Image (tube, rainbow, N blue to C red):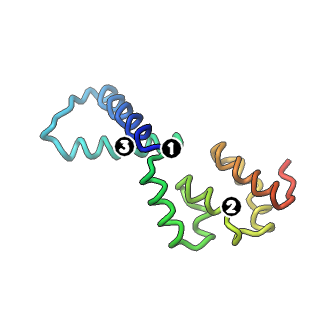
Amino acid sequence: MCTITSDREMFKKEIEIRNANSIEYDVYNGNQNYEIGIQAHEMIKAEGIFAQYDFLNAVEEYFNLPIEISLKSDDMIIKILSLIDRRVGMRTLQGLKKSILNEKEIIQYFYNLRCEAEGIRTS
């Protein structure tokens, strides 16, 4: 989680998007630049590259969500935070066993870490 790394990767993604769609950078086309920036940001977040502000925004959202909704969140950071939350009990963790296999590797890592701490077998 580094804002500089995130910004660098986002810049690369923006260039990839522009090249793939044959779009030249136009300083006066703010809407287009904004949309490409949003698309690039979503792409790097899906790859697990986060800026500090992504983490802080996710934590703020996490604090305002019920744990049941946090566990189903599409946001990787929120889902990880919910997996290590003490409000998630052993039965809930056991219930997630099959669905967690469809998640990204980092989410599976934190699930396994929590299960290990609780003494739950995951294999």
2 or 1: tag closer to the N-terminus: 1
Look at label 2 and name its amino acid: Ile
Badge 3 element: helix
Dot 1 corresponds to which residue?
A: 46
As rendered, which of 50 and 42 lies closer to the eye? 50
Percent across and percent down for residue 55 are 49, 55
- Element at badge 2? loop
Residue at x 67%, y 60% (from the top left corner): 83
From the viewer's perspective, tell me whether residue 21 is left or right of residue 42: left
Left or right of 39 in this view: 82? right
Percent coordinates x, y for residue 86 in the rendering: 71, 69
Q: Report the amino acid beneath label 3.
A: Gln
Residue 79 vs 20, above or below: the answer is below
Near-viewer residue (64 or 103): 64
Q: Are marks 2 and 3 in contact (CB under 8 Å)?
A: no
- Residues packed near mark 1 inside 10 Å, few (<14), some (14 to 19) or many (20 plus): some
Between circles 2 and 1, the one closer to the viewer is 2
Q: x, y percentage for residue 30?
A: 18, 45
Q: Which disc, if any, is residue 39?
A: 3
Please tell me the numbered disc located at residue 84: 2
Give the mark nearer the N terminus: 2 vs 3: 3
The spot of residue 73 in percent (x, y) is 56, 60
